[in-house]
């Protein structure tokens, strides 16, 4: 059987997708990026996992996260109620933004996986399968349930000395959902396309389709390797019809514009109050650093460090790392370029964790809703901080690490003429890189 071609997303090298053992992963021979993994799960196993995740998701969002009691008053706090209260307070942008990241996009990820697995298992792909996979590919990086789970713990600690707290069924459900969605993140849109390839339901490119005088690249939506124009124009993918370029267009201007915008939004995010706490005897506003100091004063040193890292260190690290990647474009050898690739992987990994403080504010809005006793309202810094997260993640998505590897052929990051296509090479031996899929 002829093996499909797969292109490395970090250096552009073409490989044959050879069969590997269960639990193994195949890495790029050039940059070491993980090309694909072989899961222990069959299609039926993945389908069972998705159905379980959907049930747990419903439990987590229907039942209360915690029940808080203050002076004979009781509040049942859950995520939908927190989003509703934020909307009622007039913070429409914040309510929609957090609702997308904590509810709608995770739900879309689950439903898209369920729909795709059902279609592949029935061996009949619907005509809109490519659009569903594009939606899944969009939802994957923006699904932030693990960050929400950490925010729940931080919010409960902040209220530990103010009210009597009884944990609800949803807090356990969110913990389980975090584990399930982390496992489900391995079932990406690209992996589903590969399942469809293995089932013979979609076309794919092989080494025999590659000609030495043409440029080839992969579609970022479905992974199909195909010829592309030398002038950098986008062409419709032959498999999913999404626009395919040899390299991402205009990365220099896009990434720098997003970095500058993120730095501008980062100033009010740290200077302005992120929330306002109104009680019967006081009315105080708190900044992000103020919240860290309060956690430290309450004795929660570990959570104070976590919030400081997620809210201050992580955004600055992302911005500085992207600036380093954008200003270091010259070829300095494979070792240095691999280090740059690892730095880019770090930026991708930590991208969503800066949303921690925004989620904490939303949850405290619901938990402290005791009329006449206490009320928490989001401050202007919450939207600014959410905007910083969005801009830095978009900057990382706009950056193309393949251009750094193109420079080994004597090109700069802003060169218009692409490098010659690499000849197909077999994937790295899976026995050398073992790990769970």
Image (cartoon, helix red, strand yellow):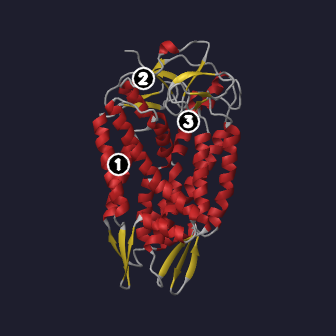
Does dot 2 land on a helix, a strand or a loop?
loop
Could you give the CA–CA distance between mark 1 and mark 3, rounded to whole angstroms?
28 Å
Does dot 3 land on a helix, a strand or a loop?
helix
Q: Residue at x 62, y 67 (%)?
A: 380
Is residue 436 visible in the rendered structure shown here? Answer: no
Residue 370 in the image: state x and y as whole percent.
Answer: 44, 80
Residue assigned mark 2: 17
Q: Earlier in the sequence, mark 1 or mark 2?
A: 2
Q: How many marks?
A: 3
Could you give the CA–CA distance between mark 3 and mark 2, rounded to whole angstroms?
22 Å
Residue assigned mark 1: 180
Q: Earlier in the sequence, mark 1 or mark 3?
A: 1
Foreground: disc 3 or disc 2: 2
Residue 286 in the image: state x and y as whole percent.
Answer: 57, 72
Is residue 392 visible in the rendered structure shown here? Answer: yes
Residue that sits furthest to the bottom in the current view: 281
Image height of 412 relative to 4, above or below: below
Q: Which of the 4 quarters of the picture holds residue 162?
A: bottom left
Quadrant position of the N terminus in the picture = top left
Q: Earlier in the sequence, mark 3 or mark 2?
A: 2
Residue assigned mark 3: 341
280, 138: nearer the viewer: 138
Image height of 182 relative to 59, above or below: above
Q: Which of the 4 quarters of the picture holds residue 4?
A: top left
Could you give the CA–CA distance between mark 1 and mark 2, rounded to whole angstroms?
27 Å
Q: Label 2: few (<14), some or many (≥20) within 10 Å?
A: many
Quadrant position of the C terminus in the picture = top left
Does dot 1 land on a helix, a strand or a loop?
helix
Foreground: disc 1 or disc 3: 1
Image side of residue 58 versus residue 143, left or right: left
């Amino acid at each position: 059987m002829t093996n499909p071609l797969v292109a490395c997303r970090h250096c552009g090298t073409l490989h044959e997708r050879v069969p590997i053992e269960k639990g193994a992963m195949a890495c790029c021979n050039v940059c070491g990026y993980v090309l694909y993994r072989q899961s222990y799960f069959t299609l039926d196993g993945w389908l069972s996992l998705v159905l379980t995740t959907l049930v747990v998701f419903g439990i987590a969002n229907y039942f209360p996260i915690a029940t808080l009691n203050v002076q004979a008053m009781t509040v049942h706090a859950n995520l939908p109620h927190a989003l509703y209260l934020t909307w009622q307070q007039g913070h429409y942008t914040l309510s929609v933004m957090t609702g997308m990241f904590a509810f709608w996009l995770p739900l879309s990820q689950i439903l898209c996986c369920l729909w795709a697995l059902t279609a592949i298992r029935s061996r009949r792909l619907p005509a809109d399968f490519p659009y569903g996979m594009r939606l899944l590919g969009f939802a994957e990086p923006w699904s932030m349930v693990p960050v929400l789970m950490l925010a729940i713990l931080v919010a409960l600690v902040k209220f530990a000395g103010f009210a009597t707290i009884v944990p609800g069924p949803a807090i356990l459900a969110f913990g389980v959902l975090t584990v399930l969605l982390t496992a489900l993140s391995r079932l990406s849109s690209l992996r589903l396309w590969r399942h469809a390839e293995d089932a013979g339901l979609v076309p794919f490119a092989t080494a025999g389709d590659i000609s030495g005088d043409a440029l080839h690249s992969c579609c970022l939506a479905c992974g199909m390797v195909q010829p592309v124009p030398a002038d950098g124009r986008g062409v419709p993918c032959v498999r999913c019809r999404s626009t395919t370029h040899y390299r991402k267009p205009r990365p220099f201007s896009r990434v720098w514009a997003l970095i500058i915008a993120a730095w501008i939004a980062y100033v009010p995010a740290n200077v302005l109050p992120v929330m306002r706490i109104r009680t019967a005897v006081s009315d105080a506003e708190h900044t992000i650093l103020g919240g860290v100091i309060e956690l430290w004063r309450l004795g929660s040193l570990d959570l104070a460090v976590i919030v400081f890292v997620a809210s201050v260190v992580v955004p600055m690290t992302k911005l500085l790392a992207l600036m380093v990647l954008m200003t270091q474009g010259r070829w300095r050898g494979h070792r240095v370029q691999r280090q740059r690739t690892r730095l880019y992987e770090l930026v991708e990994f930590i991208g969503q964790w800066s949303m921690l403080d925004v989620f904490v504010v939303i949850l405290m809005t619901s938990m402290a809703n005791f009329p006449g006793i206490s009320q928490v309202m989001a401050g202007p810094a919450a939207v600014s901080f959410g905007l910083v997260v969005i801009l830095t993640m978009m900057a990382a998505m706009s950056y193309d690490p393949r251009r750094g590897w193109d420079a080994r052929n004597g090109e700069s990051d802003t060169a218009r003429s692409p490098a010659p296509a690499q000849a197909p090479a077999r994937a790295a031996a899976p026995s050398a890189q073992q790990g769970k899929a």
